Amino acid sequence: MLDQFEELLRSVPYSEQFPGVTNLVVRAVEPSEPPLLEADLHANPLSAEEWTAIAREYLHADCAFEGQAYWDLWVYDSAQNGWQRGPQKLEIFCHGEEYDGGVWAEAGHLHADLGFEHLFTGHARMLGPNPSPSPAPQDGFEASFQALMAEPANLREYHGKTRENIQKLMDWLRKIEKAIPIENYRLWSEGEENFEARLDEILAVR
C-alpha cells in the first residue's frame, strides 16, 4: 500500500516554492481518534522516499496516512489586479482496508483533494461552450470579478489560464497511470454533477 502511495507522491508536480511533501499525519481506527503522528514539514519538505520511510513505521491495516503538498496553478489575484501562478494546496490520502469501517471502498485506497474546484471549472459557469448568465454577486469580490469578465479579452484570458490548470491536472493523471497499477479512478467535486465532463467542455473551447 505504501509503495504505491510513494509512487503517487513521487508523481506530484510540486510547486517551485515547496518542492516536496509539507506535512505528515498518521491516523488509526477512525478520524475522531487523535493522530498517532503529526508533523509540519513546511520548513524542510521531504521527498516521497523520505516521507514514506517515516510513515512505514506505522503501517497497519487500520491506519490512514495524510500528506500535504503544493503545486503551481493560475489564480486571479485581486490585490495585484492580475493572474498569478503560485502554490495551491494538495491533500493526499492513503486508507488502510480496516480504517474507518472500510472507507477505502467509497473513497479509494488513494485519494487526492485538489483544492478549490473553481481553479478548474471557473466561477459561476462563465467558461465553456454555453456560458451561463452570471448570478447575483454574493460580495464585492464577485461583483468586481464579474464586471472584469464582462470584457471579452479578459474572459478569453480567464479561459486560457483555466485551461492551463486543467491541462496540468490531466498531465498529472497520465503520470499517475504510468506509475501505479490503477484499477479505476474517479474525478469528482461537490459543485459539479459531472466534474470530468465539465473539464472536457472547457478544454474543447478554443
Image: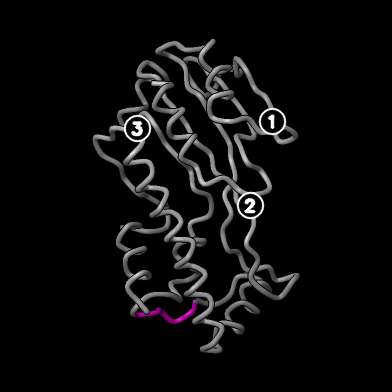
Secondary structure, mark 1, is: loop
Q: Residue at x 46, y 28 (%)?
A: 6
* Residue that numbered label 2 is attached to: 87
Q: Position of residue 188 (x, y in %)?
A: 37, 49
- Give the amino acid at mark 3: Gly
Q: Quadrant of the N terminus?
A: top left
Q: Is residue 104 above or below residue 17?
A: above
Helix, strand, or loop for circle 3? loop
Magenta span dominant secondary structure: loop
Q: Regarding mark 2 in the picture, which secondary structure is present there?
A: strand
* Residue at the spot of label 1: 41
Q: Earlier in the sequence, mark 1 or mark 3?
A: 1
Between the C-alphas of marks 2 and 1, the distance is 15 Å
- 84 in magenta: no
Decide: is 152 above or below 142.
Answer: below
Q: In this picture, which residue range is highlighted in magenta?
A: 130-134
> What is the C-alpha distance between the residues marked 2 and 3?
26 Å
**Label 3 near label 2: C-beta < 8 Å?**
no
The location of residue 116, given as percent across then percent down, is 53, 54
For residue 3, which quarter of the picture? top left
- Residue position marked by numbered label 3 in the rendering: 108
Residue 104, position as x, y percentages in the image: 35, 27
**Quadrant in the picture for residue 185:** top left
Tag count in the figure? 3
Q: Give the mark nearest the N terminus, 2 or 1.
A: 1
In this rendering, is residue 192 above or below 123? above
Tell me whether circle 2 and circle 1 mark residues in contact (CB < 8 Å).
no
